[in-house]
Amino acid sequence: MTRSERLPGYGLELPSQHMILDSLARYLDDDEIPDIWERACRQAGVDIGNPPTSAEELLPLVDALERCGDLAAVCAKGLRIRIMSYQVLSRSYSKAGSPAGI
């Protein structure tokens, strides 16, 4: 799946750096995002120029965002739920070949 694809039957967006930055934009002022993003990447050991490409690789970034506190932490809690839901439903979809109950 590409970044713009969604999990069939569920509409969940493939977890990506883009998804995280879009979510941060809903919580924070635009001028705050670059500093918080850079700090989270540094804490998670992520190269800003080479962003993670899988849900598993994104979770350390979510952990780092939680440690940033305030609204970044609130955003991170929602992101964790989205990423983990995607992982569970994706495995279910892969095993069954279609969304459960659809």
Image (tube, rainbow, N blue to C red):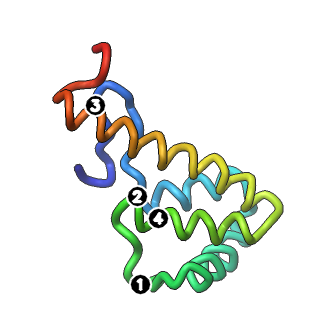
Whichever of callouts 3 and 1 sits on the residue coming sooner in the sequence is: 3
Crowding around mark 2 (Cα neighbors within 10 Å: few <14, some 14 to 19, many 20+) is some
Gap in angstroms between the C-alphas marked 3 and 4: 21 Å
Against 66, residue 6 (above or below) is above
Whichever of callouts 4 and 1 sits on the residue coming sooner in the sequence is: 1
Q: Which of 33/91 is in front?
A: 91
Gap in angstroms between the C-alphas marked 4 and 1: 14 Å
Gap in angstroms between the C-alphas marked 2 and 1: 18 Å
Q: Which residue is mark 4?
A: 58
Q: Quadrant of residue 35?
A: bottom right
Residue situated furthest left in the rendering: 97
Is there CB contact under 8 Å for labels 4 and 2? Answer: yes
Q: What mark, if any, has residue 49 been given in the picture?
A: 1
Against 34, residue 87 (above or below) is above
Left or right of residue 71, residue 48 in this image: left
Q: Which residue is mark 2?
A: 55
Amino acid carrying mark 1 in the image? Gly
Q: Which of 55/50 is in front?
A: 55
Q: Secondary structure at mark 3?
A: loop
Amino acid carrying mark 3 in the image? Pro
Amino acid carrying mark 4 in the image? Leu
For image coordinates 75% across by 71% down, the residue present is 68
Crowding around mark 3 (Cα neighbors within 10 Å: few <14, some 14 to 19, many 20+) is few
